[in-house]
Each structure stands twice: as structure tokens, then as C-alpha cells.
Image (spheres, rainbow, N blue to C red):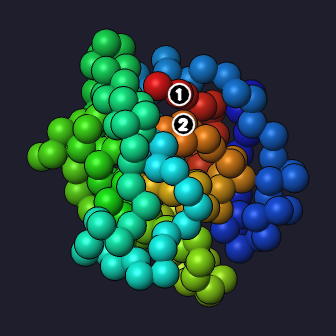
């Protein structure tokens, strides 16, 4: 099921957006072969919720990290792209260790670029989340390829951008629309 999410969506409450938008769990892997497509992946399985109180961005030992299941999911993501011959134009990642590791295991160390606009705002103020979501939306709206833009980020970020609450390692496939909105075209899993 295809639908448009207005560019003002990040300023609406997440609950209102989620209630007004229903995403079919259609397999959207074929969509990723189309030029200019975007996929927002939630990082692979990292047990727990949020981060410990002693969290430091530059110290993975202080963060919630991928477990073996998560590492296997990340490798399967990369295998899916390769086996389906999906051209990856760029890979952006939040600066959290679990997102970086997901991206690197799937697409290789050299392919991944940190993008702070996709950092988690799980326990931060609403003002920060709105600003970050607007920054992320601008990055996504500008993408035209070549290839697919892959973003590895967090559930809160994806939900703020799309109204979809993805599972670990699940991707939400988007297509930018000329008016600056993003069209959700489906979901993918490893």
C-alpha cells in the first residue's frame, strides 16, 4: 500500500501520525532496485531499551550493543542486497555503536558514513527530536541516487519520519516526492 507522508509530519505528534498512517507489511525488496529509493533500517538486535546511564558516544562499552543474533541479522541484510543485485549509492549511520556495527557488517567498513541527524533522540527533549527529524527529512528529500540510499538508525527516528514502528533490522522503504514529502512504499526484513 502506497501513501504520502506530508513534509510537516515531524511536527505532528508521533501518536497522531501513527494513528493516521497504516503501512502494509508488503515485501518492498523489488522497490530498492529503482533509482533514488531510500531505506531506513532500524539497527539489528541489541538487547534492552535505551542506553545505560553512563552512556558515552565514543565508548561502545557504555552502550547497548548488538548480540550474536543482531550480528547475524546485519550480515543477512548485506547478503540480501548482494543477492538481489541492489545498487547501494550511500550508507549513512547514526553515531551509536549498534547502528555503525549493523551498517558495517552489512555493507563494509568503507561504505559507512556517520550522519548525526540520524542519532537517537530516545531520551532527549521534544525540541531536539523535532530539529533532528527536520534535518534528517532534508537529507532524505534531497536523495536522487544513483542507487539506493541506506540509512541505519533507531526506531524513534524512523517512527518520527514515517509513522512506522519497525522491528530490529527491519527497513522502511521510501521514495522522495517532488513536493518534499516522502512516500512509504513498503518494508523489508533480512
> What is the quadrant of residue 14 in the picture?
bottom right
Residue most toward the left?
110
Q: Position of residue 165 (x, y in %)?
A: 68, 48
Image position of 89 (left or right of 163): left
**Mark 1 nearby-residue class (10 Å; few <14, some 14–19, many ≥20):** some
Task: Tell me the SS state at disc 2.
Answer: loop
Which numbered dot is residue 189?
1
| Residue 45 visible somewhere in the drawing | yes
| Residue 18 higher or lower than 126, as above or below | above
Residue for point 66% across, 68% down: 10
Instruction: Name the residue rendered at 49%, 21% in the picture.
Output: 29
The local crowd at label 2, few if under 14, some if 14 to 19, many if 20 or more residues have their Cα within 10 Å, is many
Residue 54 bears which disc, if any?
A: none
The residue shown at (35%, 71%) is: 62
82 sits left or right of 170 in the view: left
Q: Nearer the viewer, residue 47 or 57?
A: 47
Distance from the alpha carbon under mark 2 to that under mark 1: 5 Å
**169 over 162 or under it: above or below:** above
145 or 22, which lies in front?
A: 22
Proximity of marks 2 and 1: CB atoms separated by less than 8 Å: yes
Q: Where does label 2 land, which residue?
A: 170
Where residue 106 sits in the image (x, y, percent)? 29, 35
Coordinates of residue 54 in the picture (x, y in percent): 41, 82
Location of the N terminus (image quadrant)? top right
Where residue 116 sits, quadrant-wise, is bottom left
Residue 89 vs 12, above or below: the answer is: above
Q: Residue at x 71, y 64 (%)?
A: 9
Q: Position of residue 160 (x, y in %)?
A: 65, 62
Q: Secondary structure at mark 1?
A: loop
Amino acid at each position: 500500500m502506497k501513501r504520502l507522508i506530508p513534509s510537516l509530519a515531524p511536527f505532528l505528534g508521533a501518536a497522531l501520525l501513527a494513528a493516521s498512517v497504516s503501512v502494509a507489511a508488503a515485501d518492498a525488496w523489488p522497490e530498492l532496485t529503482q533509482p533514488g529509493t531510500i531505506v531506513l533500517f532500524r539497527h539489528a538486535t541489541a538487547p534492552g531499551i535505551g542506553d545505560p546511564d553512563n552512556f558515552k558516544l565514543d565508548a561502545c562499552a557504555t552502550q547497548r550493543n548488538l548480540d550474536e543474533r543482531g550480528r547475524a541479522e546485519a550480515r543477512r541484510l548485506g547478503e540480501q542486497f548482494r543477492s538481489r543485485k541492489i545498487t547501494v549509492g550511500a550508507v549513512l549511520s547514526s553515531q551509536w555503536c549498534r547502528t555503525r556495527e549493523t551498517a558495517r557488517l552489512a555493507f563494509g567498513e568503507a561504505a559507512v558514513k556517520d550522519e548525526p541527524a540520524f542519532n537517537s533522540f530516545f531520551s532527549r527533549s521534544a525540541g531536539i527530536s523535532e530539529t533532528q527529524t527536520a534535518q534528517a527529512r532534508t537529507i532524505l528529500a534531497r536523495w536522487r541516487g544513483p542507487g539506493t540510499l541506506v540509512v541505519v538508525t533507531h526506531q524513534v527516528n524512523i517512527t518520527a519520519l514515517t509513522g512506522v514502528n519497525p522491528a530490529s533490522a527491519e527497513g522502511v522503504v521510501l521514495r522522495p516526492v517532488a513536493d518534499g514529502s516522502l512516500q512509504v512504499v513498503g518494508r523489508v526484513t533480512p
